[in-house]
């Protein structure tokens, strides 16, 4: 079982045709959790890609998570699943995947986070702190929501929304410790270098503050 309290840089990525090159590159760069977040492609295409990703993540001892579907997570041999407020319940995920599986839960408001704390989730996400094209139509929550959520939780809270090498140090100084990255890596022409730049900025910022476990 992976301890997500020690994991800092979580990549969400949709289907692409270069996973065998892209994924090892970003893992070498410092990504330490990976999620396949694909909202359009058929389940069979997602499953095929997930099995490739699981194998690569195993080689790097990095947890691999499926988005939305615990059934696909089980079929792929994933380490867990991430669900949103409108997806299947955390309880259903636990029933299907077991007590040791990673189960993540998205939150977008203080009210949702209040309810999430009562769920048997491994970790939470909070955000997006700013509007982002990966969550079309969802307004930004603002930074304070993520900071407050992190302070209230004994479990990891991964902040979402526009995280990159330029702003991650400021987010650390604000009190955050776990970060989801998407476009700064997936849209980069040099994904390994981009992941390494974010990770270095993150690690440098963490080294300058007193870092609690979560």
Image: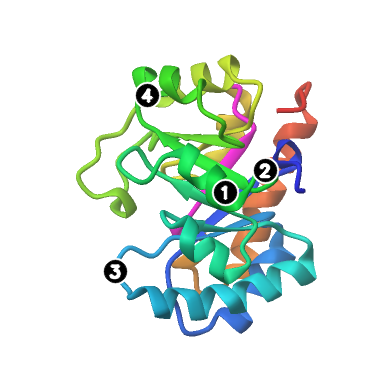
In this orientation, does residue 166 appear?
Answer: no
What residue is drawn where x is 71% and y is 57%? 30
Which mark sits nearer the N-terminus, 4 or 2? 2
Which mark sits nearer the N-terminus, 4 or 1? 4
What residue is drawn where x is 32% and y is 47%? 132
In the rendered image of this protein, does residue 110 appear above or below residue 50?
A: above
Give the colour scheme shown. Answer: rainbow
Outermost residue toward the front? 95
**From which residue to which does the magenta span run?**
175-183
Which mark sits nearer the N-terminus, 3 or 2? 2
Q: How crowded is mark 4: few (under 14 residues within 10 Å), some or many (20 or more)?
A: few
Q: How far apart are marks 4 and 1 (CA)?
A: 29 Å
Q: Which mark is residue 112?
A: 4
Q: Distance between the residues labelled 2 and 1?
A: 13 Å
In this orientation, does residue 25 appear?
Answer: yes
Q: Distance between the residues labelled 3 and 4?
A: 26 Å
* Left or right position of 145 against 196: left
Q: Mark 2 points at which residue?
A: 8
Q: Looking at the image, is mark 4 or mark 2 nearer the viewer?
A: 4
Q: Are marks 3 and 2 in contact (CB under 8 Å)?
A: no
In the rendered image of this protein, does residue 202 appear above or below residue 186?
A: above
Which mark sits nearer the N-terminus, 2 or 1? 2
Give the structural element (helix, strand or loop) at label 1: loop
* Left or right position of 145 against 75: left
x, y percent for residue 96: 54, 52
x, y percent for residue 207: 80, 33
* Left or right position of 103 against 196: left
* Left or right position of 106 against 202: left
Which mark sits nearer the N-terminus, 1 or 3? 3
Q: Mark 1 points at which residue?
A: 165
Q: Mark 3 points at which residue?
A: 40
Q: Is residue 98 magenta?
A: no
């Amino acid at each position: 079982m992976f301890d997500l309290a020690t994991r800092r840089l979580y990549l969400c990525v949709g289907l692409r045709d270069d996973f065998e090159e892209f994924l090892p590159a970003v893992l070498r760069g410092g990504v330490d959790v990976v999620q396949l977040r694909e909202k359009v492609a058929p389940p069979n295409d997602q499953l095929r890609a997930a099995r490739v990703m699981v194998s690569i993540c195993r080689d790097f001892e990095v947890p691999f998570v499926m988005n939305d579907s615990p059934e696909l997570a089980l079929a792929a041999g994933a380490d867990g699943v991430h669900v949103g407020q409108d997806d299947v319940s955390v309880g259903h995920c636990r029933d299907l995947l077991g007590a040791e599986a990673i189960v993540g839960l998205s939150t977008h408001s203080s009210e949702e986070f209040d309810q999430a704390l009562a769920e048997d989730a491994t970790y939470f996400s909070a955000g997006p702190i700013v509007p982002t094209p990966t969550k079309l139509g969802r307004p930004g929550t603002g930074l304070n929501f993520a900071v407050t959520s992190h302070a209230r939780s004994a479990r990891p809270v991964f902040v979402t929304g526009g995280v990159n090498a330029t702003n991650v140090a400021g987010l650390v100084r604000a009190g955050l410790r776990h970060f989801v990255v998407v476009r700064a890596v997936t849209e980069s022409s040099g994904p390994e270098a981009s992941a390494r730049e974010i990770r270095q900025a993150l690690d440098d910022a963490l080294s300058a503050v007193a870092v609690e476990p979560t």
